[in-house]
Amino acid sequence: MPTVPDESVNHVPVLLDEVLEALAPKAGETLVDLTVGRGGHSEVIARLIGPTGRIIGFDLDPANAAFSLERIRRTGCPAETHHASFVDAPSILRKSTAHADMVLADLGFASNQMDDPARGFSFRTEGPLDMRLDPTGCVTAADLVNHASERELADLIYRYGEEPLSRKIAREIVAIRADHPIENTLYLAEVVRKAYGPRARQSRMHPATKTFMALRIAVNDELGRLETLWDELERTIDAARLGGGWLTAQARIAFISFHSLEDRIIKHRMAALVKRGAAERITRKPVIAAEEETDLNPRARSAKLRAVRIAPMP
Ligand SMILES: C[S@@+](CC[C@H](N)C(=O)[O-])C[C@H]1O[C@@H](n2cnc3c(N)ncnc32)[C@H](O)[C@@H]1O
């Protein structure tokens, strides 16, 4: 049954065909969607696994967890979603009756979050400098920008944004905030532009792109959470190979990342599993979007999909 376009979804799932090929969902199977978002991938998988299947979703954003639940349930597939970080998913799943055949993590943010000025992710629209994916989280981008030391800011912008002008930008932020706290997206974008000076005109991307990305990664501890998730997944995979835990013995696991720092972690973690014989590759190389997809959805340009399958015990 074709999916009905729905304006309220405000997110197009990336690499959808490629995810379906990698996970190969079958009727009656269970999917754990670690970043269920607007339910785009899950809804399509729900139709394939049908009423005897099951979807268990997680999202840091309670609005997305609630929205996707409605959307998935409309397909007739049993579903539950949790407002929780994927870091906490393994302990929640251990206490459940779940036996998952597929795990999907489509990292980062959804378009509805980026497009909402009140969430503070975009340097193109005016809003509070927030950037929390989980609105109940305690640290906002404004907290970092106004309270971190110049050194901490420079390191953060360099490490997470790979921004060569990080020291100049941190110096500018600290000079400006001494007179006036920086609490607004457009104000911060202007401060970064000022630090860039004449280079701003030569830059192909907006000068604030890397600084905003760095702050988002820091506020949401994106890399720390991803490493912790993989620590848990490795233990879960070992348990599954012995016939225990919440994953089936030949489960498929797919990750979509949107920047090189995330992709590096996924690449190394998957390679380590393959090397010690605990998993087999489904994707030989990272799968990227075809031109037809990136023409329609520019966000897909930076997406990379990697997938493995748990390997049977020798
Ligand atoms: C790219 S979107 C997922 C879109 C989804 N695949 C779809 O097709 O609608 C990423 C989602 O992951 C959520 N998210 C990011 N980090 C998370 C984490 N550590 N734990 C749980 N959810 C997270 C975000 O709030 C966002 O809703």
Image (spheres, rainbow, N blue to C red):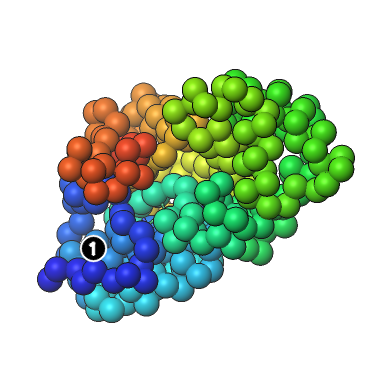
Residue at the right extreme? Answer: 178
**Horizontal placement of 283 versus 272: left or right?**
left
Residue at the location (68% across, 52% down)?
184
Residue 280 quadrant: top left
Kind of residue at badge 1: Val
Quadrant of image for the N terminus: bottom left
Q: Position of residue 16 (x, y in %)?
A: 24, 51
Q: Determine whether the residue tagged by mark 1 lies in a helix, strand or loop.
A: helix
In the picture as drawn, the residue positioned furthest to the left comes out as 1
Q: Residue at x 75, y 35 (%)?
A: 173
Image coordinates of residue 66 in percent, x first then y, are 46, 73
> Which quadrant of the figure has residue 228?
top right
Residue at which label 1 appears: 44
Please tell me which residue is depicted at 27% across the width and 35% down the height of the picture.
288
- Quadrant into which the C terminus falls: top left
Q: Is residue 108 above or below residue 133?
A: above
Q: From this view, report whether residue 142 is shown above or below residue 203.
A: below
Q: Quadrant of ligand 1?
A: bottom left
Residue nearer the viewer, 236 or 126: 126
